[in-house]
Image (cartoon, rainbow, N blue to C red):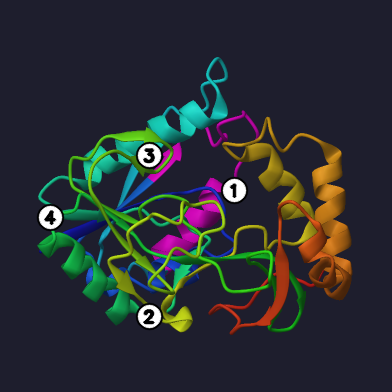
C-alpha cells in the first residue's frame, strides 16, 4: 500500500514534530502554500520559516513544494481551506493508495498503531480513517496542559476530519468527506461529546496511541495571529474568545473545576509528554 501525504504550510509551531512522526512511512509529502505568502483571510504567514524547517528534516527528498493561489479574499475562509486541501490532495493522490491529511499541529504518538489501523481501514473497504485526537487547549506549566474532555472530565476523542483518505477522494468541508469511514475510538462506544451515541466504533486504541492535537497551544502573539488566519476566523473574531483562552490558561484549576457548569468547552488538566523540539512559552 503506497501512502503519500499533504500538509498546509503555514505555522512552524509543531511542524517538525508532526512531519517527523510519519516521514519514514510515506513516499511523498506535498507542501501546499499560497505563493503570495498570505493566509485564507489575507494575513501574512511565515511560509519561508516553515520551508526552512522542512528542508532540514527532508533527508530523503520526499517533500515537494506545491504553491498555489489560496488567499482568495472574495471567498469565505473555510471555502479557501477546502479548496487548498483539495488541490493538495489531488496532487498527493498520484500513484498513491492513501493520503495522510494531518495538520502541522497534529503529532502522531504511536506510528505503528496508527498505520496498523489504517491497514484495517483499507481491508474493510473504507475511503476514510477517523482516528482519535486528543485536543489540547493550552499549556499552563511544563508538561501540563488543558485538554478538551467530556462534561465529567473523562477522556474524549476529537475528530477534525479523517486523518487519512483514499487517493482521489473529494473533500466537501475542510477535511470532511462522504462515503464509508473506518472509525477508531478510545472505547467501544463513542467518546466524542459532539458525536451520536449510535456511531459505530470499528476498533479501539489506547489513549497513549492518539494523535496529540496542539490546537490552541501557542504563545500569545502566535495565538492572536492564528485566530486571524484560521478557516474559522469569522467565528473567532470576537475578542472575548482570546480573553477567555488567556484566563483559562492562567487559571487551569478554575477552568477545570468549572467544567460541569458549562454547556461546552469542557476542560481538564492533564500531564502529557512535551512534543519533540519543545513547546511554546507558558502564558504568564
Sequence-first tag of 1 and 3: 1
The disc label shown at residue 110, or none: 2
Q: At which x and y percent is residue 13?
A: 60, 62
Q: Could you tell me which secondary element the residue under label 4 belongs to? A: loop
Q: Could you tell me which secondary element the residue under label 2 belongs to? A: loop
Label 1 environment density (alpha carbons within 10 Å; few <14, some 14–19, many ≥20): some
Label 4 to label 3, Cα distance in Å? 23 Å
Label 3 to label 2, Cα distance in Å? 25 Å
Sequence-first tag of 4 and 3: 3
What residue is shown at x 78% (from left), y 64% (from top)? Answer: 259
Q: At which x and y percent is residue 235?
A: 69, 34
- Which residue is label 3 attached to? 85
Label 1 to label 3, Cα distance in Å? 19 Å
Stretch of the chain drawn in magenta: 32-56
Side (left or right) of 111 relative to 73? left
Q: At which x and y percent is residue 171?
A: 32, 36
Sequence-first tag of 2 and 4: 2
Residue 187 vs residue 55, the one in the foreground:
187
What residue is shown at x 39% (from left), y 54% (from top)? Answer: 198
Q: Quadrant of residue 284?
A: bottom right
Most distant residue in the top direction: 74
Between disc 1 and disc 3, the foreground one is 3
Q: Could you tell me which secondary element the residue under label 1 belongs to? A: loop
- Which residue is label 4 attached to? 125
- Which residue is label 1 attached to? 46
Q: Quadrant of the N terminus?
A: bottom left
Between disc 3 and disc 2, the foreground one is 2
Between disc 2 and disc 1, the foreground one is 2
Magenta span contains residue 55: yes
Decide: is 173 above or below 268: above
Label 4 environment density (alpha carbons within 10 Å; few <14, some 14–19, many ≥20): few
Amino acid at each position: 500500500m503506497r501512502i503519500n501525504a499533504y500538509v498546509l504550510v503555514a505555522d512552524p509551531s509543531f511542524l517538525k514534530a508532526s512531519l517527523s512522526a510519519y516521514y519514514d512511512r510515506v513516499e511523498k509529502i506535498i507542501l501546499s502554500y499560497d505563493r503570495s505568502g498570505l493566509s485564507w483571510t489575507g494575513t501574512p504567514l511565515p511560509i519561508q520559516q516553515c520551508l526552512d524547517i522542512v528542508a532540514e528534516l527532508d533527508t530523503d527528498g520526499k517533500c515537494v513544494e506545491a504553491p498555489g493561489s489560496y488567499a482568495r479574499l472574495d471567498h469565505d475562509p473555510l471555502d479557501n481551506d477546502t479548496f487548498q486541501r483539495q488541490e493538495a490532495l489531488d496532487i498527493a493522490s498520484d500513484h498513491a493508495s492513501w493520503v495522510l491529511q494531518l495538520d502541522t499541529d497534529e503529532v502522531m504518538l504511536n506510528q505503528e498503531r496508527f498505520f496498523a489501523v489504517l491497514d484495517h481501514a483499507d481491508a474493510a473497504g473504507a475511503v476514510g480513517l477517523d482516528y482519535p485526537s486528543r485536543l489540547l487547549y493550552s499549556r499552563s506549566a511544563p508538561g501540563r496542559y488543558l485538554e478538551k474532555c467530556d462534561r465529567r472530565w473523562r477522556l474524549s476523542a476529537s475528530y477534525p476530519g479523517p486523518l487519512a483518505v483514499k487517493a482521489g477522494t473529494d473533500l466537501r468541508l475542510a477535511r470532511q468527506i462522504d462515503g464509508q469511514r473506518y472509525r477508531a475510538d478510545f472505547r467501544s462506544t463513542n467518546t466524542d461529546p459532539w458525536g451520536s451515541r449510535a456511531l459505530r466504533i470499528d476498533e479501539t486504541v489506547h489513549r497513549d496511541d492518539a494523535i496529540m492535537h496542539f490546537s490552541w497551544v501557542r504563545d500569545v502573539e502566535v495565538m492572536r495571529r492564528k485566530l486571524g488566519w484560521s478557516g474559522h476566523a469569522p467565528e473567532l473574531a470576537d475578542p472575548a474568545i482570546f480573553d477567555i483562552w488567556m484566563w483559562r490558561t492562567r487559571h487551569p484549576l478554575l477552568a477545570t473545576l468549572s467544567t460541569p457548569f458549562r454547556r461546552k468547552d469542557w476542560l481538564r488538566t492533564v500531564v502529557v509528554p512535551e512534543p519533540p523540539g519543545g513547546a511554546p512559552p507558558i502564558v504568564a
